[in-house]
Image: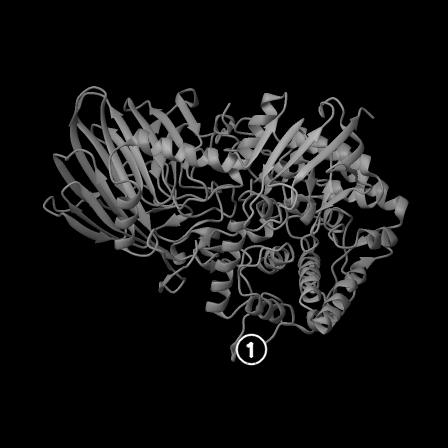
Amino acid sequence: MKCVNYVDPRIGTVGDEKKTSIHGGGKTHPGACYPFGMVQLSPDTTTSGDNGTGYNYCHSTIEGFSFNHMSGIGWYGDLGNLQIMPITGKTDLRSGSNAEVPFRNGKLGWKSPFSHENETARAGYYSVMLDRYGIFCEATVSLHTGMLRFTYPEHTESALIFNFSRRIAGRAKFQHVKMEGNYICGSIVCDHTLGGFGRGRGKIDYTLFFCLELSKPCHSARFFENETFLDESLTEAEGEDLHLLVRFSTKNEEKILVRCGISYVDAKGAKNNLQSECPRFDFENLYQKTESAWERALSHVLIDGSDETDKTIFYTCLYHTMLDPRTAVDVDGRYADERREIHYAEDTHRTMFSGWDVYRSEFPLLCILKPHVVNETIRSLLRIALSRNSSFPKWELMGIDSDCMVGDSGLLVMADAWLKGIRDFDIKKAYEIAFASASVKKTLFGKPFQSVRPDCVQYKENAYVPEELSETLEFLLADYALAQLALALKKHEDYQFLMARVNRYKENYREDFGFMCPRDENGNFTNVKDLYDTKGCVESNLYQQSWFVPYDIPGLEKLFGKERMRNLLENLFEKADFSALWNENYNHSNEPCHNLTHYFNTMELPERTQYWTRRVQKEAYRTGAFGFCGNEDVGQLSAWYVLSALGFAQVCIGNAKYDINTPLFRKAVIRLDERYHACTVSDTLTVVCDKEPLEYPYIESISLNGKKLDRNYLTYEEITSGGILQFFLKQS
């Protein structure tokens, strides 16, 4: 059976409503996507609340279909531009489910009820029946284009509504649209002053250009704005709330198609993208090409297991790890930077780097499965850093560092990749930027430099951020990764400087409290209530954050006491509900706890790693809309599952070893990339278990290419050299 047949994009599609905690569900969308593609063409159920994809499985109406989406994100999301809705008959001139732009005159809107029973989502394809109109809607995509196919009933007033002002978590600032025959082309300017990521706090600005064609001439077309029709003679219009209504007469089951190319560069780019990838109204051909692209991407890992549900979860997770970082360059090699200046890229310029999330599992996975994507992402981040003369972005979208979350995550993935041999980027400039960031330099390359690190004496002299424990520990991890890079580059003075700071993590341990704790500007520990206090912690509490020293687990054992640390970690897991959206104890729904199950390996308790990893796999991941225990986080939650299902996880970025756990499947074959991987034994790594791992969850012994492995980890070099990794399992 094909890999694509196991992908269910509806997994995790719950958003802000019907939740049991301060956080919603997975916040994925079910729409049609291409591997790492620019277009994510998905239905929209709302433009309101913390429903960052515009789709929430708990809603009962659809307001349209838009061409670009984020997947698995919080902070209210962004994109969702160029929304198209098919209708019949008369309608109000608002969707009716867009709280960002409320009604002036209407009451119901054009939104339509739908049933999930009449909804289909596959890799590269989506369809649904709009019950209000009896219109069957289908979507598919290519890398830069999307196609919609609407099957209408017989009606003299069938129509399409184009909402050009729509933007998730806000609205577009300005739109310009022109009709020429069956073509509709234009631009949508999005400015953070009117919302978007973080409701504008992410400061994401961009312009979307589009070029679309209708498969059938309309018998009338009319622009409207602010629920008021404009002059019926207009074929070109601009404004701040621009819409277009085009009408047709349709026979029963008549199909009207829309093919569309988008670009973030210019109108030429949108048209070139359309003509290059989608020159005809051939829906089936476009879908077949996209399905084949997904099959090639997903078949980098072929699994053999007895549990069909596990296969569905695995390949759906693998699918989600291959949505971002997405293509940001047009077919002609051009991309636009944050200042709207146009450049040519020799490779694929990429965007949507959710750094704080994805450095933990997503990029360690991509280093194995898609190293070229890692390399291109680093080159893209380096271009941005050089353009701004700043640190690497830590959460990038549209060439802009949104300043979301904490740490120095761009530095982390750069250093980790180079240490793994993924090196097709300018390491001299990358290192200079990274070291300038770590040392909070004022200037670099003869110009003012912007560091993501705090410019305060406490940080510069004592390696901590006042009142902020999470920031302190995140920056120390970045220092550790950079220190390993400095050592590899024979920059010994830098290495000594960085490691001296790294080892000061112990100063954040408060002995009378027994946990890590934030410190004030004078170096005194702040008052906290208990170990569940969130003071100084980002999306975590002191209990969860105190373990965030992945580069020195033995050092943590000395701080906490060996037996006490074991008991505390056991308690952290024992008290957790892994299926819950939020936990005060082990919290798999957010990143600070990720990879803690593998700490037991270093503590010489590998059976506890095997036990707790399996528990998390089985209880935190499910099928269905509620399948993710928290925000999918741009591939991170999925990547943790994929890696652990294969039998390992990278606990510490910058340390190229992957801790072992019991695989989930009897056999998995991982295809390697000879351009980036050693492949000295084989161009595949086969992970095989001698018994059914669902029945025999513990490891008795391991061999790598016929030799017994007397340790609980693999090196990245061993994984990417290929061969056979054999697990010999036992029941207890």
State the count of labels. Answer: 1
| Quarter of the rendering occupied by the C terminus | top right
Residue 163 falls in image quadrant: top left
Task: Residue 506 in the image: state x and y as whole percent.
Answer: 81, 60
Q: Is residue 121 visible?
A: yes
Establish if 456 lies above or below 42. below
Residue 437 falls in image quadrant: bottom right
372 horizontally vs 439: left or right: left
Q: Residue at x 50, y 57 (%)?
A: 402
Establish if 684 lies above or below 398. above
Task: Residue 507 in the image: state x and y as whole percent.
Answer: 80, 63
74 horizontally vs 542: left or right: left
Farthest-out residue, bottom = 446
Mark 1 Cα within 10 Å, few/some/many (few <14, many 20+)?
some
Task: Check disc 1 and give the amino acid type.
Answer: Thr
Establish if 173 lies above or below 568. below
Given residues 489 and 560, the one toward you in this image is: 489
**Coloring applied to the structure:** one colour
Establish if 308 lies above or below 495. above
Task: Residue 546 in the image: state x and y as whole percent.
Answer: 76, 51
340 horizontally vs 182: left or right: right
Which secondary structure lies at badge 1? strand
Q: Residue at x 87, y 55 (%)?
A: 512
Residue to which mark 1 is pinned: 443
Farthest-out residue, left = 233
Q: Residue at x 25, y 49 (%)?
A: 271
